[in-house]
Image (spheres, rainbow, N blue to C red):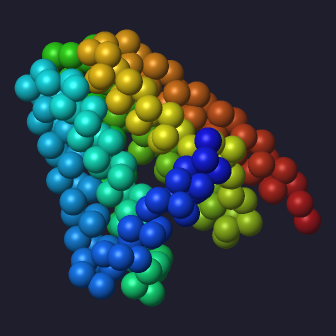
Amino acid sequence: MTEKLRVVERKIINPLAVKIAPYVSANFVSALSLMAALGAGVAFWERRPVTGAILILTNGFFDLLDGCVARARGESSAFGSFVDKIIDKYSDLIFILGMLLGGIAHPIPSIISMVGIPLATYINSAVEGLTKGEVKLQEKFSLRFVRIILLVGGGFLRRTDIAIWLVAGTVLYAVISRMTYNLIILKRHAKRP
């Protein structure tokens, strides 16, 4: 799945980024991404799931575009990548919070998702820090992409109640699998001379 996204990025997003890079900064595009996320959260809160789904797609488009614009401008940086990851996490939480506040998502999977999304990221960051960067989890597919597809599908089908349970399942999978994998790796790492 991640490879297919890279193909789309190379063929569609990069050429667009090169054209607009002289006129807009990556930070501006990141701000548009966050605004789309806020709009999606409000749409879900107002029980307009189709509008919310469209705004999630808009958020995803700007999320892909900001990095490409940064590269086209020669301004890629660790700081920009960090800000982008933070915006991604807040965006996901905003989508789910909007659904919860709008009453179109059950509280239990909503809370599981809102706690688990940052926790899954933290687990990997903690292990990278503890091993001084020696251990890095490389997933075969993007769990954020899966969450986005589930939320968008739920919005378009007006079944956010089902989508949020599926998102909670992917989040639980991420937390449990990352904890298990990282505990095994840390145990092996501790035994090394």
Q: Total of numbered circles in the picture?
A: 0
Position of residue 28 measured from the top left corner of the image (x, y, whole percent): 23, 71
Q: Position of residue 104 (x, y in %)?
A: 21, 16
Left or right of 34? Residue 151 is: right
* Nearer to the camera, 39 or 8: 8
At 29% from the left and 40% from the top, the residue drawn is: 56
The residue lying furthest to the right in this view is 193
The correct choice, above or below, for 120 with respect to 45 in the image is below
Q: In this view, does 44 lie above or below 126?
A: above
Q: Quadrant of residue 85?
A: bottom left
Question: Quadrant where the N terminus lies?
Answer: top right
Q: Can residue 82 be seen in this view?
A: no
The residue shown at (30%, 49%) is 59
Q: Where is residue 41 in the image (x, y as percent from the top left)?
A: 18, 37
| Nearer-the-camera pick, 136 or 68 | 68
Residue 190 or residue 53, whichever sits in front: 53
Quarter of the figure with the C terminus:
bottom right
Left or right, 107 with reference to 5: left
Would residue 14 be found to the left or right of residue 25 on screen?
right
Above or below, 189 against 72 in this view is above
Residue at 50 percent of width and 49 percent of height: 121
Q: In this view of the protein, can residue 4 be seen by the observer? A: yes
Q: Quadrant of residue 136?
A: bottom right
For the point 39% across and 71% down, the residue is 17
Q: Which residue lies furthest to the left in this view?
A: 46
Counting from the top left corner in percent of width and height, residue 80 is at: 39, 73
* Front residue of 72 and 166: 72
